[in-house]
Structure formats: C-alpha cells, structure tokens
Image (cartoon, rainbow, N blue to C red):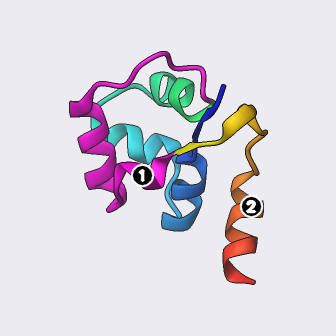
Amino acid sequence: MAIVVNLDVMLARRKMRLGDLAERVGITPQNLSVLKTGRAKAVRFSTLEKICEALECQPGDLFEYRPGGAPPASAEEEVELEQA
C-alpha cells in the first residue's frame, strides 16, 4: 500500500508506549496495533484527532504517501536518521 503509517515513529519520538497511547485515546491496544502495523482500512477523524492530541503532532506526522508502496523504515531507523 502506498499509504504508510508512522505511528511507531511518533511513539518512539515521544517515548510513549502503545498501551499508554491507547489509554489516553480511549481505544484498545489491539485496535491501535492494527493502525500501527498499517492493516487498518480506515481511521475515524475523531480517533485521529485524539491520537494527534495525545502525541502533540499533526496528521501528516502519522501518515505518509510513498508511491509504489515502498517499504517503511522502522521507528529506530527514522529516529536515528533524524538525529544524524
């Protein structure tokens, strides 16, 4: 898929665990994991708003368009690249 979810990157940047985010957003860790792994078919705007509020980010920080469905980098790679 050409839409890549960078939720793991934002969690790493904020030093937050998936379970903590799920609690703040009010959804199950399992449902948040489905989004994080890119298996979600849709995201409600209300859920996206709560995620952005909890992570203090913009929707564009969480999603990325990669033509051809290029494989995403891991959270550790993204953070390392940014710090370099």
Residue 59 drawn at (x, y percent): 36, 48
Residue 83 drawn at (x, y percent): 69, 81
Residue drawn at (54%, 66%) of the image = 13
Residue 54 on the magenta span: yes
Residue drawn at (42%, 52%) of the image = 60
Residue drawn at (52%, 50%) of the image = 17
The residue furthest left is 46
Graded by Cα atoms within 10 Å as few (under 14), some (14 to 19) or many (20 or more), the crowding at tag 2 reads few
The residue furthest bottom is 84
Report which quarter residue 56 is drawn in.
bottom left
Residue carrying label 2: 76
Residue carrying label 1: 60
Query: Horizontal placement of 65 versus 73: left or right?
Result: left
Tell which of 33 and 19 is nearer to you.
Answer: 33
What amino acid type should be assigned to the residue bearing mark 2? Glu
Return the disc, 2 or 1, that comes first in the chain's sequence: 1
Can see residue 24? Answer: no
Residue 76 on the magenta span: no
Please state the extent of the stretch shown in magenta in the rendering. 38-63
* Distance from Cα at disc 2 to Cα at disc 1: 19 Å
Residue 50 drawn at (x, y percent): 25, 43
Residue 1 drawn at (x, y percent): 66, 25
What amino acid type should be assigned to the residue bearing mark 1? Gly
| In contact (CB < 8 Å): disc 2 and disc 1 | no
Q: How many marks?
A: 2
Please tell me whether residue 14 is drawn above or below residue 21 in the rendered image: below
Front label number (2 vs 1): 1
For label 1, the SS is helix
Query: Horizontal placement of 83 versus 46: left or right?
Result: right
